[in-house]
């Protein structure tokens, strides 16, 4: 077994094809999660245009590619999962039966520590160092949209009836409801980003689109298209007016939900929920197995999910001063955040305070 580290642009076409082939065949080996678009060469290449230090570790067995790990590396040897902070799935894409030693992997990559916060399941050598595990809800549509809707109705008949009734009411009040699964107008993407920024501010969260590199990355991914990977902008219209939109990433079998938002003027119609149902219907026709809603506590995810995956947070570290220093800075912050988010008696007051501060901030900007 040999491991080499490359800049994304230096990967050969054969290596990129082998990487994509591993993802395409993952479901046949019971490892569908490895087909997540955040683990694809397309996401790595796009991120490399916006962030320094992006590298790809390529492991070969018998001269043939056996595994690929995209990561970001600082000059001091601190490693992070690629796109840490915006990536919703991280880990090693590998052939069936491949095994590795996590710390030997770090040494070969020139890293003192490798940090992750959405590590895909089934990566035991990395999971052994995880500090926590978290549910990541999904919407299963591999048996078709009708089967999904039937399961949703069985789980929560009142929710399903109410959401479908709101869609009909939206059409009566504001014109025919129209859904575009793959909208190509960049002006609508800009509208979505404005809605999302306003939502972040309104709820007291950090505005991701205030970071220029994230905005550039999303726009770059919007223009990235291949059979195995693409950025997908899905939009719900009432008449000719967009009322909800979502930008996410698609592989051959998974649609990774990423940035959903809606116009608050239409909030009473729950356009975000209607949008997700329409997304599921269209994705099922395209052969998608499931929509990955991503880690995080959200009422709409609980309403739409059919099951949950598990993702992991933590780091693999060597006994090295750089690793000790990094963990001393990062571990307390992560521990405090996870404690607040996992305890309702802490989370609910903190959430209310953030929303109150968000309202103050929003009024100050008017």
Image: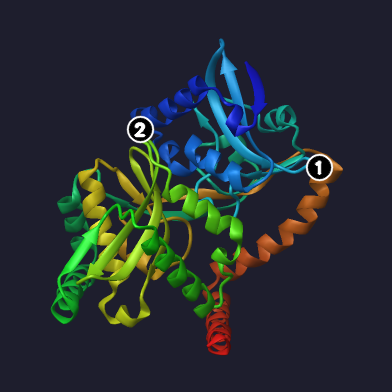
Which one is in front in this view, the residue at disc 1 or the one at disc 2?
1
Q: Earlier in the sequence, mark 1 or mark 2?
A: 2
State which quadrant residue 12 falls in.
top right
Q: Position of residue 174 (x, y in %)?
A: 19, 79
Give above or below for 359 relative to 182. below
| Element class at badge 2 | helix
Residue at x 52%, y 88% (from the top left corner): 366
What residue is rendered at 59% in x and 70% in y? 206
Q: Is residue 165 left or right of residue 246?
A: left
Q: Is 247 placed left or right of 5 in the picture?
A: left
> What quarter of the picture does the N terminus occupy?
top right
List the residue tagged with mark 1: 76
Identify whether 304 is placed above or below 122: below
Tell me which corner region of the image, top left, top right, bottom left or bottom right, holds residue 253.
top left
Q: How far from the left and from the top, in percent, is residue 44?
A: 54, 39
Q: Secondary structure under badge 1?
A: loop
Q: Position of residue 307 (x, y in %)?
A: 34, 53
Residue pointed to by mark 2 = 27
């Amino acid at each position: 077994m040999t491991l080499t580290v490359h800049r994304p642009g230096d990967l050969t076409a054969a290596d990129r094809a082998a990487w994509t082939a591993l993802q395409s065949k993952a479901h046949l080996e019971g490892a569908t999660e490895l087909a997540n678009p955040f683990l694809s060469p397309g996401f790595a290449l796009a991120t490399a245009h916006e962030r320094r230090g992006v590298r790809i570790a390529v492991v070969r067995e018998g001269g043939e590619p056996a595994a690929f790990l995209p990561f970001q590396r600082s000059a001091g040897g601190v490693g992070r999962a690629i796109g840490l902070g915006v990536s919703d799935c991280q880990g090693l894409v590998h052939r069936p039966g491949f095994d590795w030693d996590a710390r030997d992997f770090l040494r070969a990559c020139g890293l003192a520590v490798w940090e992750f916060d959405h590590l895909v399941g089934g990566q035991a050598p990395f999971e052994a160092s995880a500090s926590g595990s978290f549910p990541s809800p999904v919407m299963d549509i591999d048996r078709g949209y009708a089967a999904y809707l039937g399961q949703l109705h069985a789980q929560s008949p009142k929710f399903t009836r109410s959401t479908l009734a709101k869609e009909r009411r939206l059409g009566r009040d504001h014109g025919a409801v129209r859904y575009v699964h793959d909208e190509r107008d960049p002006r609508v993407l800009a509208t979505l980003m404005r809605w999302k920024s306003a939502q972040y501010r309104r709820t007291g969260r950090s505005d991701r689109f205030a970071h220029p590199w994230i905005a550039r990355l999303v726009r770059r991914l919007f223009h990235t298209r291949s059979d195995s990977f693409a950025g997908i902008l899905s939009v719900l219209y009432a008449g000719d007016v967009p009322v909800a939109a979502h930008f996410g990433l698609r592989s051959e079998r998974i649609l990774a939900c990423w940035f959903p938002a809606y116009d608050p003027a239409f909030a009473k119609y729950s356009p975000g929920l209607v949008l997700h149902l329409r997304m599921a219907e269209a994705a099922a026709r395209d052969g998608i197995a499931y929509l990955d809603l991503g880690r995080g506590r959200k009422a709409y995810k609980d309403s739409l999910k059919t099951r949950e995956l598990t993702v992991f947070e933590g780091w693999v570290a060597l006994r090295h001063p750089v690793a000790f220093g990094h963990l001393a800075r990062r571990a307390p912050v992560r521990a405090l955040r996870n404690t607040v988010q996992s305890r309702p008696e802490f989370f609910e007051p903190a959430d209310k305070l953030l929303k109150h501060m968000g309202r103050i901030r929003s009024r100050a900007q008017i």
